[in-house]
């Protein structure tokens, strides 16, 4: 089944404790992206990747890192999480670019205390 | 920045009625997409309309695009309780590399 998976689905952590949210897709998509969704602010793009070893900042990249060492994986790293990073995070993938249909993961609800 | 803005923010209708949601955007686009999100879950793609298209249909969905007004509308005909969800428009920018979502329309369909 074609899908985008994220782990963990739920996470409660404390300020400053490094964490990684994994994202994997099995559709051989070149484009992958991370979004955060906050009430009243909609979905905002954090980082995106056009292909292996090609990543770029979105609209809200501060406090986040990403890597794309393999085509199928695009982890989101929070080196020193802060309470303002409490949010619902979505990973998405698409065939080639942001113009294409995006396939979303189920989301990761992160709480930073 | 939010390129797309939906209107209305919330809509409540009875089952069987039609629901219309509007989206406005600011800059030139290649494509405009509509997505649906059930509460707290991942977004699901509904329909993609290219900038050179004016109207597109998919089942009970009808999407129009007016590039001169930088606006799009999503019409759901004969709505069902299962259509209750949030609906988002999304437009590409930055040479198609980025995707910007609007704030969404929360649709409630009462049985």
Image (cartoon, grey):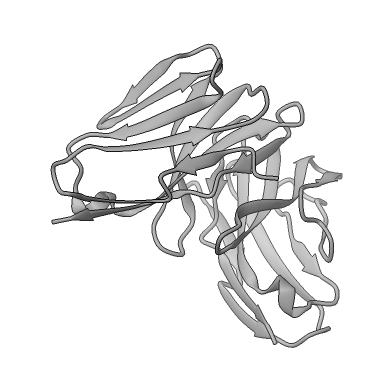
Q: Residue drawn 80% across and 51% down?
A: A68
Locate residue A28, reporting x and y percent. 64, 40
Q: Is residue B56 left or right of residue B19?
A: right
Q: Residue drawn 75% across and 26% down?
A: B95
Placement of B80 over or under A62, stated as above or below: above
User: On the image, which quarter does residue B101 sit in?
Assistant: top right
Q: Is residue A66 left or right of residue B63?
A: right
Residue A29 can be seen, yes or no: no
> Of B49 and A97, which appears nearest the observer?
B49
In which quadrant will I find the N terminus of chain B? top right
Residue B110 can be seen, yes or no: yes
Q: Residue drawn 54% across and 41% down?
A: B5
Locate residue A17, reporting x and y percent. 81, 84
Total numbered labels placed on residues in the image: 0
Placement of B95 over or under A25, stated as above or below: above
> Of B15 and A54, which appears nearest the observer?
B15
Placement of A85 over or under B107, stated as above or below: below
In which quadrant will I find the C terminus of chain B? bottom left
Locate residue A98, reporting x and y percent. 66, 35
Q: Residue drawn 24% across and 53% down?
A: B82
> Of B92 and A94, which appears nearest the observer?
B92
Q: Is residue B33 left or right of residue B99?
A: left
Locate residue B51, reporting x and y percent. 56, 17
Task: Residue at the far top: name it.
Answer: B52
């Amino acid at each position: 089944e074609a899908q985008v998976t994220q782990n963990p689905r739920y996470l409660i952590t404390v300020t400053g404790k490094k964490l990684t949210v994994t994202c994997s897709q099995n559709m051989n998509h070149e484009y992958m992206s991370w979004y955060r969704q906050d009430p009243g602010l909609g979905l905002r793009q954090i980082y995106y990747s056009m292909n292996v070893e090609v990543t770029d900042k979105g609209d809200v990249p501060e406090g986040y890192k990403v890597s794309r060492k393999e085509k199928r994986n695009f982890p989101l790293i929070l080196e020193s999480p802060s309470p303002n990073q409490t949010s619902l995070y979505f990973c998405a993938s698409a065939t080639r670019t942001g113009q294409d249909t995006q396939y979303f993961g189920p989301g990761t609800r992160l709480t930073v205390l | 920045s939010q390129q797309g803005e939906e209107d209305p923010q919330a809509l409540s209708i009875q089952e069987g009625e039609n629901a219309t949601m509007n989206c406005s955007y600011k800059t030139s686009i290649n494509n405009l997409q509509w997505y649906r999100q059930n509460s707290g879950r991942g977004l699901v793609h509904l329909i993609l309309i290219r900038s050179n298209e004016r109207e597109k249909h998919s089942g009970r969905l009808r999407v129009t695009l007016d590039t001169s007004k930088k606006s799009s509308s999503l019409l759901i005909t004969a709505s069902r309780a299962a259509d209750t969800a949030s609906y988002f428009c999304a437009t590409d920018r930055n040479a198609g590399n980025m995707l910007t979502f609007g704030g969404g329309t929360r649709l409630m369909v009462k049985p």
